[in-house]
Amino acid sequence: MKTQFSTFNAADYLDDEETITEYLTAAAEDENPDVLLSALAEVAKARGMSQVVADAGLGRESLYKALAPGSHPRYSTISAVMRALKVKVAVAPLAASEPKRRVSKATAKRRSIVQECA
């Protein structure tokens, strides 16, 4: 008997605020900007693309284009999308002497999923 696998869809697992926050935080920490764009797209799918489009004041095609890997969206577009997703960016200084944060197993798994999706 052949084993069948389904395609992984991150949006299926982005079902609560904590998971979405961890997912976007891990994506924002990645040096590759496409990782964050992909993560925002997945969260938008999880929240309902139609609702995000309406709340962000963008056209559906414009939103898909802005969040596509390799795109270079304006800050105002990303800001509108993040407001529509009900998330915000927090800025903190980097400190060389700062101890590494302890990461739960769930958070580590989410971060690995983010990297796989990029």
Image: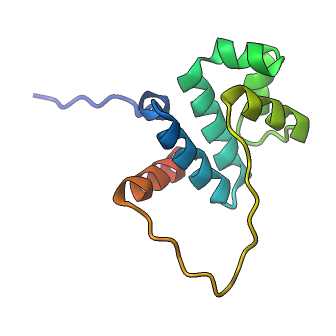
Decide if residue 20 is on the left or right side of residue 59.
left
Q: Quadrant of the N terminus?
A: top left
Which residue appears at 76% of the width and 59% of the height?
91
Which residue appears at 54% of the width and 39% of the height?
20
Decide if residue 101 is on the left or right side of residue 37.
left
Q: Residue 81: where, in percent of width, then height?
A: 76, 30
* As drawn, 36 above or below 56: below
Q: Residue furthest bottom?
A: 97
- Which sits in the foreground, 100 or 32? 100
Question: Quick check: can you spot residue 74?
Answer: no
Question: Quick check: can you spot residue 94?
Answer: yes
* As drawn, 4 above or below 53: below
The image quarter containing residue 41 is top right
Q: Residue 22: where, in percent of width, then height?
A: 53, 49
* As drawn, 52 above or below 4: above
Which residue appears at 37% of the width and 53% of the height?
106
* As drawn, 32 above or below 79: below
